Amino acid sequence: MKKFVPRPGFTACAHRLALDPNATVMGRLYSHAGAARAAYNWAVAHVTAVWWQRRAEASYGIDEDGLTPWRSWSLPALRKAFNEGKRTDPRFAGWWEENSKEAYNTGLANASAAFDNYAKSKNGKRKGARVGVPRFKSKRKARPACRFTTGTMRIEADGRHVTLPRIGTIRLHEHRPDLHARIDAGTMRILSATVRLDRGHWFVAFQVEQRNELAPVARPDAAVGIDLGIKSLAVLADSEGNVAEEPNPRHLDRAQKQLRRASRVVSRRRGPDRRTGRKPSRRWEKADRVRSKVHHRVANLREDTLHKLTTRLTREYGTIVVEDLNVAGMVRNRRLSRRVADAAFGEIRRLLTYKTRRHGTRMIVADRWFPSSKTCSRCGAVKAKLPLGVRVFECDTCGLVLDRDENAGHNLLALATRNTRTTCLTGTGVAGDLDPAAMVGPKPRGADRKTRTTRPRHPAGTGRAGGAIPSPRAGTEAGDRQQDTRTQLALW
């Protein structure tokens, strides 16, 4: 599928708005989200049924040419097969006309993307953790969502309502006449709309193409180095010599007493049991809503804190230097995992990334192996080891005594001046590759390179997830690319 490219001078972004639906509209929202989930499950069963069939036929001694043909999981192929069977399939025949076609297209598109990710992960063409075989979505666990790409999608003139296909007009929780004014002025165009139930409330996210409007920065020539941590959420060292500390609110720690109490109540109620098919009691559902409300409040407080911090930084400084932290590895520490997750280091970097683009400023990401805490900010000497429990940095060369977080902030700030001479970053793609000539001594072991090699992937066997991946384009529909079926071995 061709990727959308915005026009010159425009950018693609999203505006997320809270909804206040009445009982009728809420029923339609749940119906569309359920239709998307049902279409997704149909697509998973439609594709994997052939995998099981081919495996059974191969066990009977049937040769490759006599096996059941593969079913393509491309979106056009799934959409064609779904439209042919929705009128006769007992799972959809009685109610499919109640929802918009976009609801079913949402589920089919998600299933096609899931199979693509699985195939690329198995063939080594996708970065990150391995992706498993797409599984059915549970009604109890799946997040209700539906995406609209065609039909009536608009923000009403009063700025208090939005209109979506087949759902109708929905009242907004906030007043946003500015968005309607942008659409009327021709500086913004709605591309799609996604409704989703998140933290107990319905939201609509309008993906739009809007004109670039760079917001002014208070100090465009100033730079700041940000050292993230747990004791203090961030230590800020700017180019004017000011050092500020952003306290860590620790919202999750403050809510632990309420969570323990709510969890005890939930554990004493009769909950669901997937093994026996037992449904939860009304008292369990009520207690679970109380516990979820505490989690939702913590998430909202954390999101509010991070947005205020990142917005203030991007509006004030022209250059921001942050670290490339291995957050996934940090949360494996059983002693610090909860506090690391509560600080949300990865979310801070994500917010800074798109907000600096919005203001037209620069963000430098220090290399993951850059020793910001071990390096002396005065003479550049690097310590071999600096345990996390040592909170004060003491330089053995020049005698500098400084808080370790403040020292790291100064070292990150130095990367901004080091990268002002060139517009491109260093060889690793991020800043932090120190010049060996500028170092006082040789780098100690572990300061600038990995200390543990990545475990190589084992070759796929012949088990449930072994073998090669059938092509997503191995169909006979118009527009699908053909591929030799002899290279498509069973996944199961």
Image (cartoon, rainbow, N blue to C red):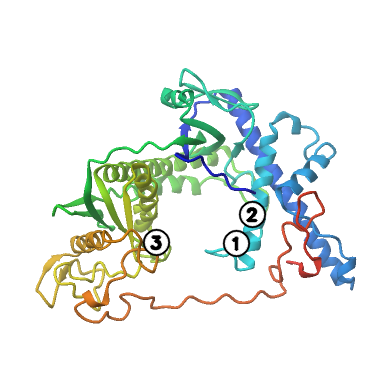
The reply to whether the C-beta atoms of the residues labelled 1 and 3 are less than 8 Å apart is no
Residue receiving disc 1:
131
Classed neighbour count for the residue bearing mark 1: other residues with Cα under 10 Å, few (<14), some (14–19), many (≥20): some
If you read the primary sequence from the N terminus, does the residue marked by circle 1 or circle 3 appear first? 1
Q: 267 or 190, which lies in front?
A: 190
Q: How many marks?
A: 3
Report the Cα–Cα distance between label 2 and label 3: 25 Å
Residue receiving disc 3:
327
Residue type of the residue flagged with mark 3: Val
Q: 323 or 436, which lies in front?
A: 436
Q: Where does the image place residue 10, in percent across and percent down from the top left?
A: 46, 38
Q: Where does the image place residue 355, in percent across and percent down from the top left?
A: 36, 44
Residue receiving disc 2:
114
Residue type of the residue flagged with mark 2: Ala
Classed neighbour count for the residue bearing mark 2: other residues with Cα under 10 Å, few (<14), some (14–19), many (≥20): some
Q: Where does the image place residue 366, in percent across and percent down from the top left?
A: 32, 63
